[in-house]
Image (cartoon, rainbow, N blue to C red):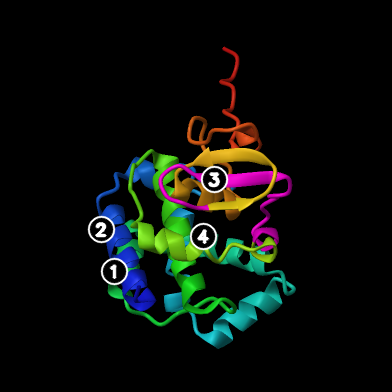
């Protein structure tokens, strides 16, 4: 697979989806804790709009904490940009060479795929990421990557229902490959998407409605 072309296709497809989202969906919570769809989409395009020096200044301002920096920038950009501008940033930069500090092109693909799923899964859109893109990312899962993204995969086996792939050892967690990818990136999924003995461990709890 040509990863550069896969990245461009992923960005173009997500831009088209974002361009047709109703305003209420932009305000809806995503799978990224504390971020709405709007913050996730703004974050996805931040690398196209920020120079290396700007990123370093923001990182210094965040006292070297990468997660604090990305949270601040996502909230800032989500407030400053219109939804039209956010979607256009993805489409117009489909072939932009941005890559995360580590991981190269596969990490850039993972950034787009996982954040795209943060949006579509949370909104209930049944978008299927092409299998070849998902496979590249599944093959890159390691204990180190899981730890970086806050995923505790100890004592479980992730086993895909829709392709021949598994990871780990222990109590089973089954589901679509792209859902298991989200688990490996530290996400909790909506109820009903995972099966197996340890599925509840990676399933978000529904909040109870407030008492009348």
**What element does badge 4 sit on?**
helix
What residue range appears in magenta? 146-165
The residue that appears at 36% across and 63% down in the rendered structure is: 86
Q: In this view, does 184 lie to the left or right of 192?
A: right
Q: In which quarter of the image is residue 188?
A: top right
Is disc 4 surrounded by few (<14), some (14 to 19) or many (20+) residues within 10 Å? many
Name the mark nearer the viewer: 4 or 1: 4
Label whose residue precedes the other's in the sequence (1 or 3):
1
Residue furthest out toward the front = 164
Residue furthest out toward the bottom = 53
Label whose residue precedes the other's in the sequence (3 or 2):
2
The x and y percentages for residue 150 are 68, 55
Front-lying residue, 83 or 9: 9
**What element does badge 1 sit on?**
helix
Label whose residue precedes the other's in the sequence (3 or 4):
4
The x and y percentages for residue 196 are 58, 33
Q: In which quarter of the image is residue 87?
A: bottom left
Q: Distance of mark 2 from mark 4, alpha carbons?
A: 25 Å
């Amino acid at each position: 697979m040509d990863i550069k072309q896969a990245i461009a296709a992923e960005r173009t497809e997500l831009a088209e989806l974002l361009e047709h989202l109703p305003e209420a969906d932009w305000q809806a919570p995503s799978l990224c804790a504390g971020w709405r769809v709007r913050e996730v989409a703004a974050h996805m395009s931040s690398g196209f709009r920020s120079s290396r020096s700007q990123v370093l200044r923001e990182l210094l301002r965040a006292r070297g904490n990468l997660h604090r920096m990305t949270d601040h920038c996502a909230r800032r950009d989500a407030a400053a940009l219109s939804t039209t501008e956010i979607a256009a940033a993805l489409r117009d930069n489909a072939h932009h060479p941005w890559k995360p500090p580590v991981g190269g092109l596969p990490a850039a693909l993972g950034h787009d795929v996982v954040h795209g799923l943060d949006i579509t899964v949370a909104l209930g859109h049944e978008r299927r990421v092409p299998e070849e893109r998902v496979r590249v990312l599944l093959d890159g899962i390691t204990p180190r990557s899981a730890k970086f993204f806050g995923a505790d995969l100890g004592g479980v086996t992730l086993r895909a229902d829709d392709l021949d792939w598994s990871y780990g050892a222990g109590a089973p967690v089954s589901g679509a490959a792209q859902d298991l990818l989200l688990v490996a990136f530290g996400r909790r999924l909506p109820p009903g998407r995972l099966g197996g003995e340890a599925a509840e461990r990676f399933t978000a709890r529904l909040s109870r409605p407030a008492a009348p």
